Structures are given as C-alpha cells and as structure tokens.
Image: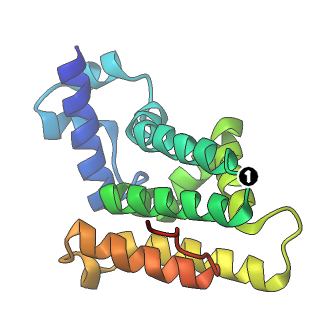
Amino acid sequence: MGTARSRLLAAAMDLFMRHGVSGTSLQMIADELGVTKAAVYHQFHSKEDIVEAVIAPALAELEAVADAAEAQRRRNDRLRVALEGVVDLVVRHRGLFAMIMTDPQVGRLVRSRPPLRGLEERIEAVLTGPDPDAETLVNSAMVSGALMVAGLDPRLAGLDDETLRRHLTATVFRMLHVRRRATS
C-alpha cells in the first residue's frame, strides 16, 4: 500500500507542477498511473487530501526548522538557524516550495488549516521579531519572495544544490543583517 501511495503522490506532484493544483483532476492522476479513478479514491478521499499529503513531509521538516530556531536564545542565532533551514528546504524541494508559494489553491489550503497557518506565522515571527519596523517587514517580504523565485526561475534551474544553497544563504543573510556563525 505504501508503494501505491508513494507512486500516486509522485504522479500528483508532477501533474501539480505542470498544470497547477486547480488544473489537475483526479482523473488525470489516475490516467498518469494507469489506474481507475476509484483506485485514486481508495488512497485519498479528495484532491485536497492529496495536496496535503504531497506537502506534509516538507512541512514537517519546516516545523523542525521552526522548533530549532525558536530554541535559540539570541536573535541572530534564531535568524541564522531559521534561514539556513529554510534555504536548505527550498533547495532540496525547489518545485514543491514554488508550488506552495505560488499556487492559489495551495495558498488557500495553508490559510484554511490552523496548524499550517500557525507554522507560517512561527517562521515569520522568527524572521521579523516581536515588533518589526518597516525595514524589517520589507526585508522579510523580500527574503520570502527571493526564496520563492529560487524555485521558479529557470535561470537557476541549472545550478547544483550546493551552489544555489551557498548563494541563497549569503543573499538572505545580507538582506536580514544576519551575522555568520563564528568558525573555529
């Protein structure tokens, strides 16, 4: 059952990336797998359930990043841990994070689910602090946008993961005035 579920999620993700969530039907997923629509319904009750299952592993990783960042005592350390973690996730899951950030149906899903919305708010609170000024808010919005573009921009598609990770990290650290960790 796990293999069928994994295959279904991989096919759905591929179709979501090509057609968007709204442009992908359960029948399209079934056709991609060479199964009946009933077989898809046997695994998931709705397309929304499939979307949640597709994004769940990355959201669990993002929650671990939020936990690690919030556990830091100093603001610079919280920012560093959060940014390094988010950059790593964006690099490893380029297409998925682009979909999460740009597909209106996924955005509605995130906003409609308190746990998902709460996770987004936790990361934002780490990035901006308790009483952000205008510069901090703008910088945080720019960082979010830059990370979204990293998953979408075809000019970056050919960059290997380590090169992209290094440049994204340097850029977001500069934008949010984060000091690098001291090396021994």
* Image position of 22 (left or right of 36): right
Q: In the image as oriented, which residue stretches furthest toward the left?
A: 34
Q: Name the one closer to the observer, 2 or 20.
A: 2
Q: Quadrant of the C terminus?
A: bottom left
Q: Residue at x 45, y 80 (%)?
A: 170
The image quarter in which residue 44 lies: top left
Q: Is residue 91 above or below residue 180?
A: above
Q: Residue at x 43, y 22 (%)?
A: 45
Q: Residues within 10 Å of mark 1 (few under 14, many from 20)?
A: few
The image quarter in which residue 54 lies: top left
* Image position of 85 (left or right of 12): right
Query: In the rendering, at what x and y percent does residue 111 appear?
Result: 67, 49
Query: In the rendering, at what x and y percent does residue 93 appear?
Result: 34, 55
Q: Name the one closer to the observer, 47 or 134.
A: 134
Coloration mode: rainbow
Residue on which the image places disc 1: 73
Q: Is residue 34 above or below residue 75?
A: above
Q: Residue at x 43, y 44 (%)?
A: 58
Q: Name the one closer to the observer, 148 or 167.
A: 167
* Image position of 33 (left or right of 153): left
Labels in figure, total: 1
Instruction: Using the rendered image of the protein, determine whether residue 125 is visible from the camera's viewpoint.
Output: yes
Give the amino acid type for the residue marked by disc 1 in the picture. Answer: Arg
Query: In the rendering, at what x and y percent does residue 30 appear?
Result: 21, 33
Q: Quadrant of the N terminus?
A: top left
Helix, strand or loop at label 1? It is loop
Instruction: Using the rendered image of the protein, determine whether residue 103 is visible from the camera's viewpoint.
Output: no
Q: Residue at x 26, y 51 (%)?
A: 15
Q: In the image as oriented, which residue stretches furthest toward the front?
A: 184
